[in-house]
Amino acid sequence: MEETKLAGPILYVLIAWGAVTAVFMLLLIRRALLASHEDDQIFIGSADGQMAREQREIVSKIQMLSRPLLTSGIASGALLLLLAGLWLYNGLKNL
């Protein structure tokens, strides 16, 4: 039985995929933590201006994460497809 070696382009794509996926997961965790502090409903009186401002800040932080989340998610998926394609190509080449 042949020993499978991860070398060349497959190794580099695997490392890049791991790094991009780690960033994607960290962004997902950050968004989940921010969303846990967001209230669904706020009852604002005249003295609750501080609470309303904090909620607006949380919402703006969550919205700022949407572009990096989308980009890193698409990059992770594309790298995974590239990795699978390289693996299949390598496997078919060695038949």
Image (spheres, rainbow, N blue to C red):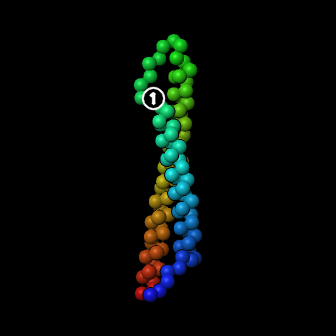
Q: Quadrant of residue 12?
A: bottom right
Residue furthest out toward the top: 46
The residue at 43%/76% (across/down) is 88
Q: Is residue 44 above or below residue 25?
A: above
Q: Quadrant of residue 85?
A: bottom left
> If the image is split into quadrants, where does the C terminus sit?
bottom left
Is any part of residue 71 visible from this angle? no
Compare residues 4 and 81 and report the one nearer the observer: 4
Residue at the spot of label 1: 39
* 16 sits to left or right of 77: right
Residue 25: image x %, image y %?
51, 52
The residue at 54%/62% (across/down) is 18
Residue 3: image x %, image y %?
49, 83
The residue at 52%/17% (across/down) is 48
Q: Is residue 29 above or below residue 54?
A: below
Task: Say which amino acid is labelled 1.
Answer: Asp
> If the image is split into quadrants, where does the N terminus sit?
bottom left
The residue at 54%/68% (across/down) is 13
Tag 1's secondary structure? Answer: loop
Compare residues 75 and 32 and report the one nearer the observer: 32
Q: How many marks?
A: 1
Residue 14: image x %, image y %?
53, 67
Is any part of residue 56 visible from this angle? yes
